[in-house]
Image (cartoon, grey):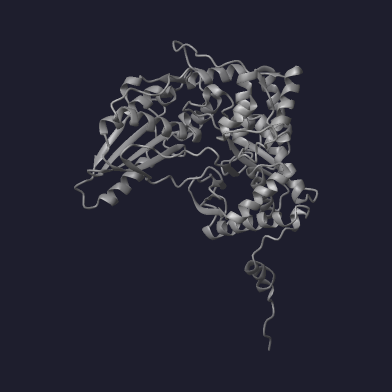
Amino acid sequence: LLAGIWAELLGVERVGRHDNFFELGGHSLLAVRVLVRLTEALAVELPLAILFAKPTLADLALSVGEVLNGSGAQAAPVIMPVGRDGALPLSYSQQRLWFLSQLDEDSTNYNIPLGWRLQGRLDRVAWRRSLDRLFARHEALRCTFVAGEDDPQVQILSGDRGLPVVEHDLRDRPDAQAALLDLCQEEARTPFDLAREPLIRGRLIRLADEEHVFLLTQHHIVSDGWSMGVLVRELSSLYRAFEAGEDDPLPPLAIQYPDYAAWQRQWLSGERLQRQAQYWRDTLSGAPARLALPTDRPRPAQQSFAGTSVPVVIDQALTRGLKRLSRQHGTTLFMTVLAAWAAVLSRLSGQDDIVIGVPTANRRRREIEDLIGFFVNTLAVRINLSGEPSVSDLLERARRAALTAQDHQDLPFEQVVEIVQPPRALDHTPLFQVGLAWQNNTVGSLDLPGLRVEAAGEGLDQVKFDLELNLGEQGEVIAGTLGYATALFDRATIERQCGYLLALLRAMLADAEQPVRELDILPAEERSYLLEELNRTEADYP
């Protein structure tokens, strides 16, 4: 059973009893999906740590057998469809986002923009039909949110109305490229009305007979990063079928997002809710309210979401070394980079107690893997660097912090904030101000017959936190971006921080037993400037 699950999720033909899950290409997100499959097959829930402790197939099988022979943790009940006649509740995460939107109804902070340039003959009828079918298929995309007497409620729009798309024809415009840029910016900066309109919309912009740009914008309250992958896959399948004159090829969905929201409120209650709440209360008790990073400008009285990013590339040799270090210490690449990022933040702030926000897909049920909806959760991962830890000590601390947080990921971040009750202020996010996102779940690209598809459109220049490190494996390297709030930092400062991270990762490889605080992360020029140039105090006197 385990070998079959591994082969499916890892994309390998054969799995041997002594094969190691992580050496076959496994990572944290795939580990969660393995446990989801086991839950479905054996009706038992297992902690994520079991796969990290027993990463070889035979050892894991023995551990699972021991759990089955014991009492074991019973799996959560199956998600069942609920009636659509009465009031439908929001999920916990949706409710928090709805509340935030009431504070600033014109905000675009939670818009998710996508854009594609389509070159070739676009079958406009098949494209339109594909968009409408996607809209009808996923109730999440047809949800609106209205204020009730006590709590907000979900109302579902008819699937017959179709996905709203505005068309523009720029074929005869001499300033077509400038007009395209204006349309992209206008689209990205147009807010949604959560109570009245579909929270997904498109624009089809025609530049030539065989060149279009399609912009698709969604509100985060109905979608997330994993959903982008579902959307791209299904849109590709639908267009291929409709363009060829075939019927809808997608299997019907057994449940919809409102069913999950109702299930979540029923399941996350009682003893289970108390257990998760107590974990976060204990874990985050006494955590610093704010990370005291040195900034280039004073922090504004109200948090600004304006931001941009610099590229980050961990080269092939360093990536290979980090994989080797991770195997030696039983961590994933994400955990190893998490440890290094915490160490850099500790150096910059002078604090030993670091809390980093880590998004998690939160798709621990097989029934919801193919749904579009707002499932993602954010975990406040706390790493303590006090007591002179060595590199290997820090890796173990990061590993333990990440695994226990993952095992308690069901409690929405919004409820964690309410439980911990950190000091609140308008100038920074509660619990943490720095994030680390590991991109295991790639969106993929549209696969449309007869068309060459490239990314297009203007993304929003926004960040949710002071610093946002977004990384993932891209072939033989680890690459991504370091996003930053432009109200606080200059680009040169962020580029220096990227250099610190790369230098610390290299130093970790050199000797895993050396104390973390002794790792040298300053480049020679900066060290010379700090220690020599700033200390040249000699002056001429008469």
In the image, is 428 to the left or to the right of 289? Answer: left
Residue 162: name its quadrant: top left
The residue positioned 54% from the left and 41% from the top of the image is 439
Q: Nearer the viewer, residue 181 or 425?
A: 181
For the N terminus, which image quadrant?
top right
Name the spot of residue 251 as percent of width and height, x first: 43, 21
Q: How many marks?
A: 0
The residue positioned 40% from the left and 23% from the top of the image is 250
Q: Is residue 191 above or below residue 342?
A: above
Residue 412: name its quadrant: top right
Name the spot of residue 264 as percent of width and height, x first: 57, 20
Name the spot of residue 52 as percent of width and height, x first: 70, 35
* Residue 309 in view: yes
Name the spot of residue 38 as percent of width and height, x first: 63, 23
Name the residue furthest left.
Answer: 172
* Residue 341 in view: no
Q: Which of 365 and 448 is in front in this view?
A: 448
Q: Is residue 2 above or below residue 69?
A: below
For the C terminus, which image quadrant?
bottom right
In the image, is 480 to the left or to the right of 457? Answer: right
Name the residue furthest right.
Answer: 387
Name the residue furthest bottom.
Answer: 542
